Each structure stands twice: as C-alpha cells, then as structure tokens.
Amino acid sequence: MSHSIARAYDAARDQYAEHGVDVDQALRSLATIPISLHCWQGDDVGGFEQLGTGLGGGLAATGNYPGKARTPDELRSDAEKAFSLIPGRHRFNLHAFYGDFESRRVDRDRIAPEHFAAWIDWAKRLGIGLDFNPTFFSHPNAADNFTLSHADPAIREFWIAHGIACRRIGAAIGQTLGNTCITNFWIPDGMKDTPIDRVGPRERVLASLDAIFDENFDRDYNRDAVEGKLFGIGCESYTVGSHEFYYGYALTRGKLLTLDSGHYHPTETVTDKISSVLMFLPELLLHVSRGVRWDSDHVVVLNDDLEAIALELVRGKFLDRVHIGLDYFDASINRVAAWTIGTRNMIKALLKALLEPANALRTAEAHGDYTGRLALLEEVKTLPFGAIWDHYCQSSGVPVGPAWLREVQSYEQNVLALRT
C-alpha cells in the first residue's frame, strides 16, 4: 500500500508541477494550519453541569446514537481518538459548561480555571492549544432567550460575571499552555415575533459587553471574539446580536469578529465577507458548519461552499489572520466519526486550495484573459488531488482512505458500546 501511494504521489506531483504548483511546499503550509475541534459534537451539547434544564438558546441536537460521552474523561478519550485519525496538529474548543464540576460544583458566575485544570493538563500532554466559549444557554437564567440584554439587571449581572469569569479562564489556558486561547462570545438573545423595541436590548448588550471586556489581558494569552447570527429557534424575528451589531462592536472595541458559515441567509455565504471585513479588522474567527435550509449545523462535507471558503483564505493570503474552528453537532451518527469526517474535509479543502495554480490564474485575470482563467479552473478539477491527500495522511501517520472508519468501528465496539 505504501509503495503504491508513493508512486501515485510522485506522478501527481509531476502533474501539478506542470501547472507551476510546488506540492511539497503546499503540504508544508498545510501542516501549519490548526483546526479547532468543538467539544459539543462529542456529547450533543450536553455539558457536565447536570442542571437538568435541557438544551436551550435556540439550539437543537437531533438523534440518539449510542455511546455519547457522559463525563469529561470520556469526552477527552473520544476526542483523542479523533485526533489520531486526522493529519496535522490541531486544537480543541471548550464551552464553559464542560468543566470538571463533579466535586467543585459552582454556578456559572463563579467558574474558575481550576474547573478546567484537567483539560489544560490533557492539552499539555497532547501538545495542542485550547479555545473557549462562555455558555449563555441551557440555564434557568436564559430560559426566555435573553441574557446580556435582559431587562432584569440582576440577570444581566449574572451573565456579565459569567463572561468575566470565562475571559479569566481563557487567559489562564493561554498562559499555562503558552498558546493563545480564542474566547468566543455568542448569546441567544432575541424574540420569536416582531419586537416593538429593537434599540433597548442592543443598548443593554452593548453596556454588558463593555463591562465584560473592561479587564485587559495579554493578547498572547487570550483574544476575544464576538459572533453574530441571523436567527434561531425562539428568536426567528429578532436577534439582538446581529452581524451588523458585532461587526461594529469588533471594529470599535478591537475584538475578533466571528463568521459562522451557518449564521446567514441560505443564499448568502461567508466567502465574500472574509476579504471585506479583513480590510478593516486584523483577525477573524471562522466557524465552519453546514446548513441545510437553515442553521442546522450538519457535519461538514467537501462541497462547493467549503472549497470556496478555503480558496478565499488561500487566495487572499489570510491564513495567518483567520482562526479556523468547526461548529456542528449530529447526534444521529457516530460522534467520533462526525469529528473525523468534518475535520478531514476542512483539511482537504485547504489542501485543494493550496494546490491551485494561483500564479497562472492571477496572470490570466490580470491580462483580462477570462476565457483562459475559466478553462484552467475547470481543468485543474481533474488533477489527482486524491494521491496528494493519501500521501499527506500516510506521512502524518494517520489512516489512509476509509481505513480510519474501521478504527472508529473498532472503538465503537470496544469502548462506546459499553456506555449505557
């Protein structure tokens, strides 16, 4: 198998070289791009607080595939298995209600780095970075889909305290690991039907965010991001934290803007937004998802939308300014497989983009040769990308082709099936 992969790789590399593409350089670049895997795929966004409130905030996980993680140790084990099947060195993205709370249970306004010490130790052992998210849902104080914009000052203060605590945790993570933590803020605030007052909630969330971000942290340890959304279940008509609101906030407060590929109208993509907002912002956080008719958070597949995102990052030379994370949760299939499929597809899309004959395409476009540009774009679609991908997996020490699925099936039989 290894010899046939090597022969196929050599032949493919020669074909790409005919178009001016340095395949070895493309693979070296690919190896430096970390993808942040999201903890919430591993347990259907359940967390480990055991508050009994159920999933809220306009979120819904469908399916009941057996074997979901029930404890932090199980989730870490599952994530580690996924990492072993994915080429490259990546990251892990935590939500605040995934701490080790069993013997140190506190409410969210009082969580601290100690509740994530085991996660930090795990990341240190694996040599990976961690990212972080406050959890503004699945809590009694978020029951009516209002948190930082709530009309009740006491509830707002609770969530402000939670946001402050999360930033301190993010800074502690970054400092301990020596690897910058991105702490991303998304809130579910909004209304099911058309509101009379759109201004008041936005004024309140503006003041709440300013209070949360009042404390300064070293950007080498923690960087804050803010994430907008078009709508959600229970806030179909009005979302306080819209794209426009957070774009303005990021611009004026020096924060990262988060673009989630599922958070816009189905006919709208984030691809064109990337170069536009990076005209004015130094960095972005990108949450990659797959919406099916709405923000349904399906597992990422290698489709035109995903490839367009990767191409924009490479063509615009934005890879050092955009942090890439995944955001989906499918409870109807094996969860380790869901992580593996989505992440491998994100990496495949980046590899395909890095293998594009950029110089020839730019030259054609600069000379107004749009016929040549289109012709070349179509011709490169049949270049032997798969041989390059197989070589990358083999050289990274991870399974080639569908062999990874057999490992997941074995893990399911020997580990996941024993969970009841």
Image: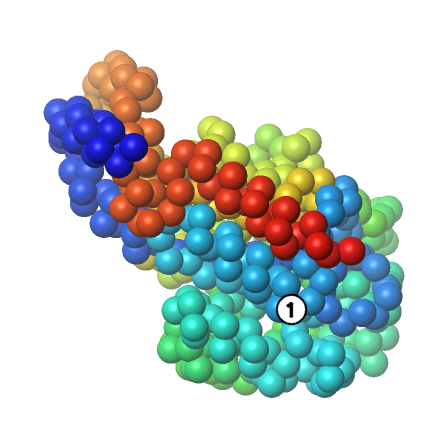
From the top left corner, tell me how far across and down residue 112 is, in percent.
Answer: 63, 84
- Quadrant where the image shows the N terminus: top left
Q: Residues within 10 Å of mark 1 (few under 14, many from 20)?
A: many
Left or right: where 229 falls relative to 366: right
Q: Is residue 168 above or below residue 77?
A: below
Residue at 63% across, 39% down: 298
Residue found at x 62% / y 68%: 73
Three-letter residue code for mark 1: Pro
- Left or right, 351 with respect to 37, comes to left
- The residue positioned 31% from the left and 49% from the top of the image is 396
Frontmost residue, 347 versus 182: 347
Residue at the far front: name it. 414
Query: Residue 37 versus residue 269: which sits nearer the camera?
Result: 37
Vertical comparison of 97 with 259: above or below = below
Residue 334 sits in which quadrant? top right
Instruction: State the residue in front, 409 or 159.
Output: 409
Q: Residue 129, can we see it?
A: yes
Front one among 311 and 33: 33
User: Horizontal and vertical percent for residue 8?
Assistant: 23, 27
Residue position for label 1: 72
Q: Label 1's element?
A: helix
The image's colouring method is rainbow
Place of residue 179 in the rendered image (x, y in percent of width and height, measured from the top left): 39, 73
The number of numbered badges drawn on the structure is: 1
Q: Is residue 405 left or right of residue 361?
A: right
The C terminus sits in image quarter: bottom right
Q: Quadrant of residue 11?
A: top left
- Residue 220, quarter of picture: bottom left
| Residue sitting at x 66%, y 52% | 416
Q: Is residue 205 visible?
A: no
* Image coords of residue 339 (percent x, y): 55, 48
Relative to 65, is 345 on the left or the right? left
